[in-house]
Image (cartoon, coloured by chain):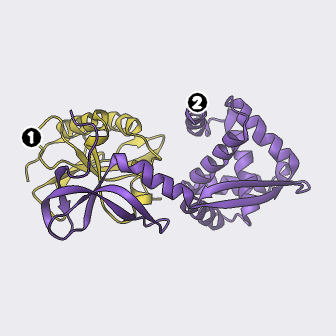
Chain colours: A purple, B yellow
Amino acid sequence: MKKFWRAGDRSRAICEDCGLVETRFEYRTYPLETPRVDVPGVLVAVCPVCDRIVAVPYQSSPRLNEARKAAEAPLEARIPRHLEDVLGVVATHYGRNDSEFRGVILRYYLHALGESDALARHIRELAAGELARGTADERLSVKVQKPVLTRAWETARNAGVRSKTDMVKGAIIAAAEDLDSAEGKERRETLAEMAASV
Amino acid sequence: MRKLGFRVARSRTIAALRAGPAYILFEDRAARESKNLLDTGEVSPEEVVAMLHRCGGSPDQYCESGHHREPSIPVHTFKPVLGGTRWYIKVYFLDGTSDLEPAIFISVHKSEK
């Protein structure tokens, strides 16, 4: 059973211009759409008629994802010191109180909020609550994939979140609330799996 | 268009996902970052298999229609609901006669609210 494709292998695919064609696997520079980055040395299936890339094998995904990750944007916020403690408690709950996993938690909640208007509204309420208040004496910095950050901020802003700092504060408190809430069950389970595998 | 039907299509998609990297291909399309979360690594092949196991064959969870560019090739759209969220998994096979052949994924994403 074939496990991986190699340059020179042949297969078939549907080309948008030429229809059903016999493809040839080649290493090409692949233009990512989001972020706009050209990734060299990606194995792809090419149409022999018009020479366009028609399919990408799963084995090329890690290389492409590495390039997506390199296009991460820093998200920086000044938050009350006790929220750093809250984030530490959340990470400890998953058995991983290290800075890497605290970043994973934040990135996960930003991703989740970008996917859910309801969570964005909840984060807006939490950011305006008592626990979010206090002197902003802690600098928090986390790298987030640009499309994830863009989507999260767009959803948060549409829900009425006033600033990226409020988005971060609300996300941390939401992660803490999810530890023992019925609404947070699915997110809790996902984070537990990530804690075990990341 | 030679139809496969829900049960065969689901079973072949699961077989391809379990068979390893050579059996998973992505159609080169626009908006891959938001429409193909299997490609971006946000969803694993095992998670797609779990979604397919939760998917039924009723019209609101599965449909089969011709590929827009090659209507003789059936495209299978699975629409399972997990945790209140509907997912869309669009996939096709070029041969359609073998129990194990590469699955070409067009989309793996959540519904847009």
Residue at the image point whose x is 47% and y is 43% from the top: B84
Rendered-image quadrant of the N terminus of chain B: bottom left
Q: Using residue A119 as the reference point, say whether residue B34 is left or right of it.
A: left
Q: Using residue A76 as the reference point, say whether residue B46 is left or right of it.
A: left
Which chain contains the residue that carries disc 2? A
Q: Amino acid at mark 1?
A: Thr
Residue at the image point whose x is 7% and y is 49% from the top: B2
Name the quadrant containing residue A28. Answer: bottom left
Mark number displayed over residue A196 = 2
The residue labelled by disc 1 is: B97
Q: Residue A171 location, x and y as percent?
A: 70, 50
Residue at the image point whose x is 14% and y is 65% from the top: A19
How packed mark 1 is, by other alpha carbons closer than 10 Å (few <14, some 14-19, many 20 or more), is few
Secondary structure category for the residue under label 2: helix
Mark number displayed over residue B44 = none
Q: Using residue A156 as the reference point, say whether residue B88 is left or right of it.
A: left
Name the quadrant containing residue A124. Answer: bottom right
Give whichever of A54, A9 is nearer the camera: A9
**Is there any visible trace of residue A182 in the rendered image?**
yes
Which chain contains the residue that carries disc 1? B
